Amino acid sequence: MKPNFDIELLPEAIKFLESLDDKTREKIYYYIKKSQFVNDNELFKKLNDFIWKFRTLYNRKAYRLFSFWDKTDEKETLIVATHGIMKKTQKTPAKEIKKAEEIRKQFLDNKTKK
């Protein structure tokens, strides 16, 4: 079965994942992989026009990996993960969404300069 989209992790997302213990990291990777095959708002949810989040709940802790769609290349669809957080409040922090938007803008600007 072919995934619905590919995923690229930017350095800050990789750094976040590497900072977690093995079991937590494996659980997040499992849910990311699962989201490539099933359409489930509990796994992958839109936050605004540009930013989405991968959602993982593990050991009563909520983890979020922010991302955006990049459809500028020949690839069918690519999701780029910007960075991650361990969520501490009910609402996703606005500053984290803004950070993801800034990373998205920088990423797309760098692509057009190449």
Image (tube, rainbow, N blue to C red):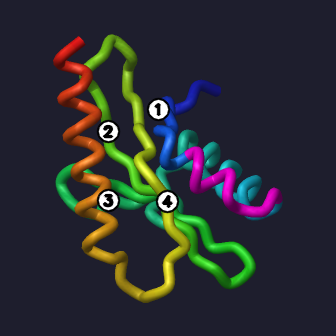
In three-dimensional space, the C-alpha distance between marks 3 and 1, rounded to whole angstroms, equals: 15 Å
Q: Residue 5 carries which label?
A: 1
- Specify the amino acid type for callout 4: Gly
Q: Which of marks 4 and 1 is in front?
A: 4
Distance (Cα) linking label 4 and label 3: 15 Å
Answer yes or no: is residue 44 visible. Answer: no
In terms of depth relative to the viewer, which is nearer, 58 or 3?
58
Q: Earlier in the sequence, mark 4 or mark 3?
A: 3
Sequence-first tag of 3 and 2:
3
Classify mark 2: residues with Cα within 10 Å, few (<14), some (14-19) or many (20+).
Answer: some
> What amino acid is at disc 3?
Lys
Q: Which residue is label 3 attached to? A: 46
Q: Is residue 10 above or below residue 76?
A: below
Tag 3 near tag 1, CB within 8 Å? no
**Residue 96: quarter of image:** bottom left
Q: Who's the residue at 24% across and 25% down the image?
A: 110
- According to the image, label 4 marks what residue? 84
Circle 3 residues within 10 Å: few <14, some 14–19, many ≥20: some
Residue at image coords 33%, 44% = 68
Q: What amino acid is found at the position of numbered circle 2 in the picture?
A: Trp
**Residue 114 percent location from the top left of the image:** 24, 12
Which residue is pictured at 23% across the width and 37% down the height?
Answer: 106
Q: Residues in magenta? A: 14-22
Q: Position of residue 81 (x, y in %)?
A: 44, 45
Does residue 30 show up magenta in the picture? no
Most extreme residue toward the right is 23
- Report which residue position mark 2 lands on: 69
Q: Which of marks 2 and 4 is in front?
A: 4
